[in-house]
Structure formats: C-alpha cells, structure tokens
Amino acid sequence: MLRWGWRAFIVWTVIGGYLLASSLMAGAEALAGVAFVAPLWAAWLLWLLWRASVYARHWAARHAYGEWHGNYFEFDGRQVRVVFEDDEIYVAAFDVFDALGTDRRGRAPERVRLITGRDGLIEIPDRKLLVFTERGLRAWMARRTDTNATKFMAWLDNDVTAPFRARRRALRGEFDADGRTR
C-alpha cells in the first residue's frame, strides 16, 4: 500500500499540478474545475502530512534512545551504559552509582577520584559522560563490602568484560588449537 500511495502521490502531483495551472490560466470560468479537484488536493496534502508524521515518530523513537544505542547493558533491572573504545572499557559512573544505591556524598567526583586515582574517573569529551575506567572501577569497588557490589563486579566480568575480550581476540585471529578464542 505504501508503494502505491507514493505512486498515486507522484501521479497526482503531475496531473493535479497541470489541472490547477491550466485552470488558473484559463480565468474565472475555469475556477469551477478547481472546486472539483479540491478534495483530491486535500487527499494529496493529507498523504504527505501522514507520511511525514510516520517518519517523525520513527525518528523520535530512534533518537530518544540514541545515547543508549549499542551501549546498553542491564544489571538488576537498571540501565548501565558501557562504552567500548579500542581495547578499553568505560562504564558510566552515574549508572554504577544508581545500580549500587550510592548516596549523594559518595557520588561526588572529587571523592571518587581520591579512591580511583586521577585516571580512574574521567569524562569522555565527545559525549560529556563521566565514566569509570576498568581499573578505576575495580579500585572503587574494592572499597565496597556490600553483596550488591560483589554481584555487580561478577556481572561486569561475566556479561560485559569477558564477551568483549573474547570478541576482540576473535577479531584479531587469536585462537587455541581447538579453534576457540584464547
């Protein structure tokens, strides 16, 4: 139906444009013909508006999650953004704080940098996103003793880091004698 709708739209654009132009050039006696084609012009305009609204809805749906696209992981029902650049893994700091229920005082970047070091908590310039480096996150998590932190690190190792490292090794062609990635 979509294909035929666009074909009808193009045909009506050509034919209707010709009819409208010829009736306007013919003068007042031909304006009665304009009243005849007015509903067809309304349908033409409605088709265009409908297709534009469908496109806008699809664009808005994709754009709403654009920041999350390709970087979304889930821990305990919470979204955790993970950014992969070359061999490095960066985890969004505020997503980690939310997942672990860190209080406001514990979220202060200055306090976190005291634990993780200067390079443990950085901002990715093109995204304006405050992230933990892998080493920084491990240093910060070593100070936590709650079970949720232990579960988080196990999840990070098993569901994020290990598959990423295996995929990188496979792309480099590093395989064992069995054909499995090292």
Image: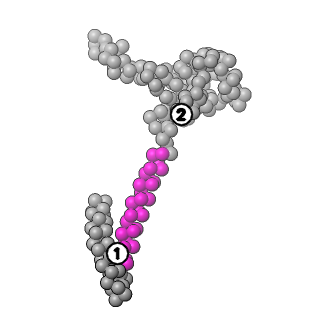
Residue at (32, 76) in percent of width and height: 21
Residue at (50, 45) in percent of width and height: 64
Q: Position of residue 120 (x, y in %)?
A: 59, 19
Residue nearest the viewer, comparing 91 with 159: 91
Magenta-span inclusion, residue 39: yes
Q: Is residue 164 above or below residue 47?
A: above
Query: On the rendered image, what quadrant is the C terminus found in?
Result: top left
Q: Is residue 167 above or below residue 35?
A: above
Residue of label 1? 40
Residue at (65, 20) in percent of width and height: 113
Residue 127, numbered circle: 2
Give residue 29's quadrant in the image.
bottom left
Query: On the rendered image, what quadrant is the N terminus found in?
Result: bottom left
Is 109 on the left or on the right of 5, as rendered? right
The reply to whether the C-beta atoms of the residues labelled 1 and 2 are less than 8 Å apart is: no
Q: Badge 1, how many Cα within 10 Å: few under 14, some, many 20+? A: few
Label 2 secondary element: loop
Residue at (70, 22) in percent of width and height: 111
Whether residue 158 is visible here, answered yes or no, is no
Q: Give whichever of discs 1 and 2 has the lower sequence position.
A: 1
Q: Amino acid at mark 1?
A: Leu
Give residue 171's quadrant in the image.
top left
